Image (spheres, rainbow, N blue to C red):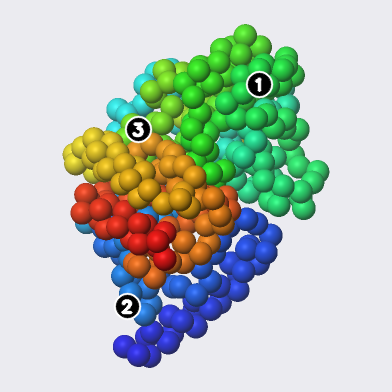
Amino acid sequence: MRERVREIRVTQRRTTDILEIEQRSGSGLWSADIALVRGQGSTIWDADGHSYIDCLAGIAVASVGHANPRLVRALSEQAQRLIVCPQNMGNDTRAAFLEKLFTFISPPLTRAFLCNSGTEANEAALKWARAATGRTKFVAAKRGFSGRTMGALSLTWEKAYREPFQPLRYEADFVPFNDLEALEAAVTEEVAAVFLEPIQGEGGIHLATEEYLQGAERLCRERGALFIVDEVQTGVGRTGQFLASESSGVAPDMVTLAKGLGGGFPVGAVLLTDEVAKSMPPGGHGTTFGGNPLASAAALAVLEEIEERDLLSHVSEVGTRLKEGLESVGSARVRAVRGAGLILGLELKEKAAATIAALRERGVLVINAGSTVIRFVPPLVITREEVDEVVEAVGAALTE
Ligand code: PLP
């Protein structure tokens, strides 16, 4: 056992070197000295045997909990049957996944393109927007995050991610979030699409108002641009609705998903209207691994868990409990609590790093969202009791 722990540490150190490169160029706070080796539900263990309540979940990914039996069984059974199938041929598991997915999604979104990550989903959405409109400009929001490949990076606001790679693929105008007047000025007749997150995740947990999303959709319709909602972080039940944008009653031309969709297995998707889907020229887009049977089995298992365990109601209940718990902490160091369901941000009046470290000491893993916001994105299956433990730990960490 000792040998094993040592081995893990050696591997961990190598990983850490890579993450440190990332830390120097970005704004994330990375825990360079921790190696996570095992998980169960909302609990995760490090190489030294310490356990944590996982309010990080691989950054909003482990939706149905670690080592979820249905997900593990689905992956293992599918792996023994068929792992790969190209996108231009049919597959029973992929078909079952898509059928289930569209029980959660309403028309006019009736088509899906499957890929492997959030940035790939946004990359594909950018191409579809160009194909459908013949235009090349985009509008995105300040503090928005769309990914790190060259197209998606064009719509990612944080300068530290973007500027070293200028010139980027697409011309993008960044407008202040929730400011309809600014959007009105930016959406000209040259704009292919407006990209918005319903809750800015990386940008500090800021919620779009209903009026803003509705106004954005209206402007897009008036000016011939597409309205694209990035639900990579907020989708698949994280807010207590399948899509966070549902409650504002908008009907986007495309929605992008990833993170929680595969429960930890890499799965991304673009949901499209029929009209937009058909605008892509033959062979215009595709990917080798997208929608492979293993990924589809994982995503199907996640959707079945959400449905059969009524996780959307559960998220609403425990999300409210966590939000109210964080609000009740009542520390003078807290500026605000924001979010919906299980995507919550605790904004401090100081840098978040010390409190994040203190929470780790108390057995709670969290991550920042910007320098002063602590982000809580636990598995959707987190229990009431675990939520109460998290709140207690936050109270204790803030009175240290
Ligand atoms: N879009 C949003 C809203 C995200 O939060 C992220 C990742 O954090 C991405 C896109 C990029 O996703 P990925 O890291 O899977 O490429």
Task: Give the residue at the far top of this rendering.
Answer: 222
Label 1: how many Cα within 10 Å (few below 14, some 14–19, many 20+):
many
> Is the CB–ligand 1 distance for label 2 below 8 Å?
no
Instruction: Identify which residue, 182 or 37, lies in the foreground.
Output: 182
Q: Is residue 349 above or below residue 168?
A: below
Label 2: how many Cα within 10 Å (few below 14, some 14–19, many 20+):
few
For mark 2, what is the residue?
Answer: 49
Q: Position of residue 74 (x, y in %)?
A: 26, 52
Q: Amino acid at mark 2?
A: Gly
Give the SS element for disc 1: helix
Q: Amino acid at mark 3?
A: Phe
Residue 24 visible in the current orientation: yes
For mark 1, what is the residue?
Answer: 183
Give the SS element for disc 2: loop
Residue 83 visible in the current orientation: no
Q: CA distance from mark 1 to mark 3?
A: 26 Å
For mark 3, what is the residue?
Answer: 242
Q: CA distance from mark 2 to mark 1?
A: 50 Å
